[in-house]
Image (tube, rainbow, N blue to C red):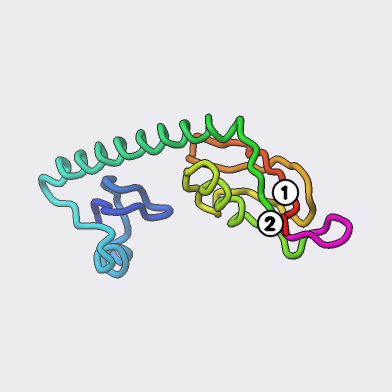
Amino acid sequence: MRVLLRTEVAGVGRRGDVVEVADGFARNRLLPAGWAVKAGPGIERQALAMRRNREKLDAEALRLAEAAASKLVSLVLRIPAKVGSGGRLFGSITASDIATAVHDQVGFEIDRRRVLLDEPIKTLGARQVTAHLHTDVTVQLSIEVVAEEA
């Protein structure tokens, strides 16, 4: 069955794509959930408008991500944390903490799932962390974990 996707569906396509899917998948999943509409005559015009809108939004998101990356490259994010003996932290610094620090210090919103940490940070000091701001924009964040003032 040919359907026009109204949202992005993993493994199928993106918003505005006209795709051929199994009849059962369309009837049981895509159509009832509102993720797609059955493609009929004249649907190509609607699909073209959806794709144009998607491309415009993607271009704007790319522009914003590149602007944020240019700010973040030269910045050192200082994250205060409570420290015990030997420079070990009480708790740890997570991707969520880093995303919050970016928002507080730069004003740019980063999804915590886009910040790549192999493991939570548990010691004081400086390090580099990778963040994916967009599918085409990746930036190295300079993080410095400092002792919180009492």
How many other residues sit within 10 Å of disc 1, few (<14), some (14-19) or many (≥20)? Answer: many
Residue shown at the point (43%, 53%) measured from the top left: 11
Kind of element beneath mark 1 = strand
Contact? badges 2 and 1 (CB < 8 Å):
yes
Inspect this view and state whether residue 120 appears: no
Question: Does the magenta run of residues contain 128?
Answer: no
- What amino acid is labelled 2 in the image? Ile
Q: State the quadrant of the C terminus.
A: bottom right
User: Quadrant of residue 22 in the image?
Assistant: bottom left
How many other residues sit within 10 Å of disc 2, few (<14), some (14-19) or many (≥20)? Answer: many
Kind of element beneath mark 2 = strand
Query: Magenta segment, which residues?
Result: 81-88
Inspect this view and state whether residue 78 appears: yes
Q: Position of residue 51 (x, y in %)?
A: 26, 40
- Pick whichever, 19 or 67, lies toward us: 67
Whether 90 is drawn above or below 57: the answer is below
Q: Which numbered circle lies on residue 28? A: none
Question: How far separated are the C-alphas under marks 2 and 1?
Answer: 8 Å
Residue matched to label 2 = 93
Q: Going by the image, does 27 lie left or right of 88?
A: left
Q: Nearer the viewer, mark 2 or mark 1?
A: 1
Q: State the quadrant of the N terminus.
A: bottom left
Q: Position of residue 59 (x, y in %)?
A: 36, 33
Whether 101 is drawn above or below 56: the answer is below
- What amino acid is labelled 1 in the image? Val
- Pick whichever, 147 or 35, lies toward us: 147
Q: How many marks?
A: 2
Residue shown at the point (21%, 57%) measured from the top left: 37
Q: Which numbered circle lies on residue 145? A: 1
Residue shown at the point (51%, 48%) measured from the top left: 103
